[in-house]
Amino acid sequence: MKPFARLLFRRLGLLIALLATVFVAVDLLPGSTGRAVLGREASAEQVARKEHELGLDRPLAVRFLDWISGVLTGDFGRTARGRSINELLADKFPPTLLLGGLALVVTVVVSLLIGAWWAAAAPPLSLRRAGSAELTSRQGSPIATAWYRTLQPATTVAAAIPEFVLATLLIMVFALATGWLPAVTITDRQGFPVSADMLVLPVLALAIPQIGWNTRVVRAALAEAAQAPHVESAMLDGLSTRVVLVRHVLPFAAPTVVASFATTVGMVLGGSLVVETIFNYPGLGAVLAGSVADRDTSVVAAVVALSGVVIMLMFAVADGIRAWSLRGRG
């Protein structure tokens, strides 16, 4: 528990340092919070009075310490417009969590399936060479060679495409050109999309780049794990490729794969803030955009803090799975 506790405190320290950086960055933005709240017609005296009311005339360090002390008691404070940040997050975070959760599930399932298929495309005795550049038409089967030549560039391109570019392309193809799927999100009274098809394009925009990256990680991890002596023994015993992968290779590749998926959580949450804006999705993206425009530091920091806690929890789960998968090894 001691190493885990040290790791937890180190991550908490990094999160607090990140929140302090957010305070500094938002404070350096041009404009005035009081002016953004009151409008252009407000006089300088009204703006100064509003900023004094919000405590913005205090030193930045004092404001940060006051805010972080409130967060430790579960109170994120109030927005510059007077709304409780706790209520705001309670309204807007569940839709973002739904979108990010679906994207993560799709990423995990598809990456595992394609990565395992890619690693197993060669004959069982060639599985250990699947991660090597030596996989050619002379050494692998035609299927293995075809998979290698297709997936190698496809996953690279998928991982390299930014979410906002991919979202725009998906809208052009599936919404504007074919009309198969909606390009914008309409919400019900609870703030969730009124139909499931409104989630398809945002989920794909988030999942496809992560599928590209994680597929390569899964394939590389499986290929490395396949080099273990017990895997060769299992192959020589005549076990099928599927059995070898599931029982003898995947458990040894699990630490690397799970760590990659845990990192994906942060990428999905970060990407969702952009994707939500493009699809008019009712999540934290609109909240963050509005708070940046208002220079509302407390809201921006609250979104970062909430996202950071979710990421930390996922890393804790990944650490637990990694410890479980490594049990009994020297």
Image (cartoon, rainbow, N blue to C red):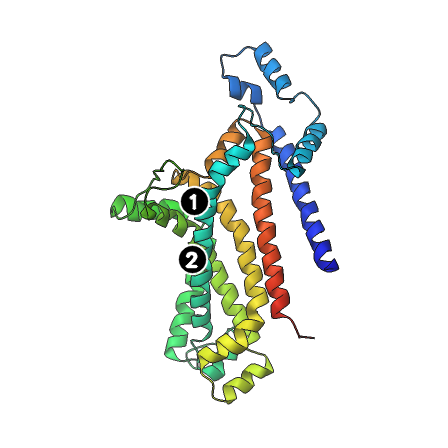
Instruction: Tell which circle, 1 or 2, labels the residue nearer the N-terminal end.
Output: 2
Comparing 274 with 286, the one in front is 286
Question: What is the count of numbered marks?
Answer: 2
Residue 106, label in figure: 2
Which three-letter amino acid code belongs to the residue tagged 2?
Val
Q: What whole-number distance in Å separates the C-alpha atoms at marks 1 and 2?
A: 19 Å
Q: Residues within 10 Å of mark 2 (few under 14, many from 20)?
A: some
Report the side of 289 relative to 22 (left or right).
left
Quadrant the C terminus occupies: bottom right
Picture layout, residue 303 above or below residue 320: above
Q: What residue is shown at x 62% (from left), y 21% (from top)?
A: 54
Mark 1 residue element:
helix
> Where is the N terminus found, in terms of image quarters?
bottom right
Would residue 16 be found to the left or right of residue 147 on screen?
A: right
Q: In this rendering, is residue 146 above or below 84?
A: below
Type of the residue with mark 1: Phe
Q: Residue at x 55, y 32 (%)?
A: 85
Residue 103's disc number: none
Q: Which residue is mark 1?
A: 164
Q: Position of residue 316 (x, y in %)?
A: 62, 56
Residue furthest to the left in view is: 178
- Name the residue located 62 percent from the left edge and 29 percent from the top edge: 27
